[in-house]
Amino acid sequence: MEREGSISRKTRETEIQVELRLDGEGESQISTGIPFFDHLLTALARHGLFDLRIQANGDLEVDQHHTVEDVGITLGQAIRVAVGEAAGLARFGSARIPMADALVQVDLDLSLRPHLVYRVSLKRDWVGQFDAALVEDFLYALCTNAGIDLHVNLEYGHNVHHTVEGIFKGFGRALDQATRIDPRIRGPLSTKGSL
């Protein structure tokens, strides 16, 4: 069974195409017009071992917000399509990522009940030309559209680059765990019989 999601989304502010293959090798082609955001998405794909292609064109002359949030929406929709009925999936994933001075914990549940807990306090908002405060908006949009209950906690750290990169790596690894198929699981992993 191919576990893939391909989504195109066009608004007055952005035009985005996302192709995701869960059973990949961590290969990616990312172009959002925001170099550090591309770097973060590449880290997500590599550490989650997903094949990911994202082409985004947005009104960056206005702000980065529309592009970052809309990539979150579109990637979330692609994850939802790729997961399908969630039959046989492990459902839960966790990753604890040390990155130099920062230690990040990411936990998630593919529950179809979206929720975001984001306990991350950044020392400053910018990494180069990227507004790191938008990471929370990206994750909220992604969770809402993918149906993920996501908890992100920064245990400590002061370097913003290390912190946000740790979040993306941790999310990739946790999502990889949650989307693994366990042959012992019949249907969705739920006492209700469905998610």
Image (cartoon, grey):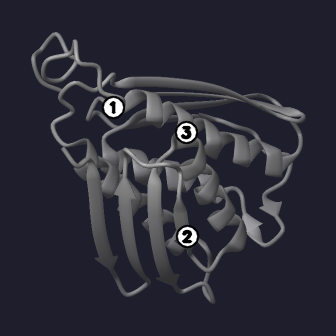
Question: Mark 1 = which residue?
Answer: 110
Is any atom of residue 133 visible in this view?
yes
Label 3, residues with CA under 10 Å away: few <14, some 14-19, many ≥20: many
What residue is drawn where x is 42% and y is 51%? 142
The mark that comes first in sequence, 3 or 1, is: 1
Q: Is residue 190 above or below residue 195?
A: above
Is disc 3 in contact with disc 1, using a CB cutoff of under 8 Å? no
Location of the C terminus (image quadrant)? top left
What residue is drawn where x is 84% and y is 53%? 124
Which of the 4 image quarters holds residue 6? bottom left
The mark that comes first in sequence, 3 or 2, is: 2
Question: How far apart are labels 3 and 1 at the CA level?
Answer: 12 Å
Location of the N terminus (image quadrant)? top left
Is any atom of residue 150 visible in this view?
no
Tell me if 109 is positioned left or right of 87 in this view: right
Question: How far apart are labels 3 and 2 at the CA level?
Answer: 17 Å
What residue is drawn where x is 22% and y is 24%? 88
Q: Which mark is residue 171?
A: 3
Q: Which mark is residue 153?
A: none
Question: Mark 2 = which residue?
Answer: 30
Check disc 1 and give the amino acid type.
Leu
| Camera-nearest label, 3 or 2 | 2
SS class of the residue under badge 1?
loop
Tell me if 167 is positioned left or right of 71 in this view: right
What residue is drawn where x is 51% and y is 44%? 49
Where residue 126 sits in the image (x, y, percent)? 80, 62
